Image (cartoon, helix red, strand yellow):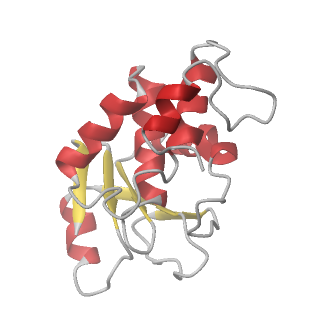
Amino acid sequence: MASEIIPGKLYLGGKPNARYSNEIFKSRNITRIINTTTEVANFEGDDWNVIRIPLEDTLQQNLYQHFDRVCDLIDCNEDGATFIHCYGDQFRSVTFCIAYLMKKHGWKYKDAKYYVQERHPIAYTKDPRYGAVQLMKYYNDLHDTGDYDDDGFRYVIRRKHVSRCGLLA
């Protein structure tokens, strides 16, 4: 299943499946596929460009270092739409869609997360902490708010609120 995040621009889903992917990709003019897994083989084809960013499906995985690159890959795809996927379409690919909305549209983390969840209901259903602190740091770096300490992943100014929400271990 490919959920439409931005019409004609960005789609989100899980592991591509040869049974349905060709038809869906062509009908939605998907010309770029971003594979954010280590465990899923690239879905090859002549009609799209495939980029792999090998990431583990763990809370400790540093997604932050790839946010700008993925956002640029989505934004510069002028030939059609981008499909971004991970294995189960709940965490890694969702996190990158949220980062894109934050960078491209200036949305705050919470607004971007809810927007993605409305269009892709299984997003962050098992562990809402996944990527949250990295995304909040990214937003603050984009807007130069300086709300983080030196290690880049601990929220400082609003730490009490974040801890209360269960976002810090």
Towards the viewer: 53 or 74: 53
User: Would residue 4 be visible to someone looking at this image?
Assistant: yes
Towards the viewer: 34 or 60: 60
Look at the image and tell me in which quarter the N terminus lies: bottom left
Identify whether 164 is placed above or below 79: above
Residue drawn at point x = 61 percent, y = 30 percent: 137
Q: Which corner quadrant of the image does residue 39 belong to?
A: bottom right
Identify whether 31 is placed above or below 161: below
Which x, y percent locates residue 52? 60, 66
Which x, y percent locates residue 118? 18, 45
From the viewer's perspective, tell me whether residue 7 is left or right of residue 128.
left
Which x, y percent locates residue 147? 64, 19
Residue drawn at point x = 19 percent, y = 48 percent: 119
Which x, y percent locates residue 165? 42, 39
Towards the viewer: 120 or 169: 169
Q: How many marks?
A: 0
From the viewer's perspective, tell me whether residue 99 is left or right of residue 122.
right
From the viewer's perspective, tell me whether residue 40 is left or right of residue 8.
right
Identify whether 139 is placed above or below 38: above
Residue drawn at point x = 41 percent, y = 45 percent: 97
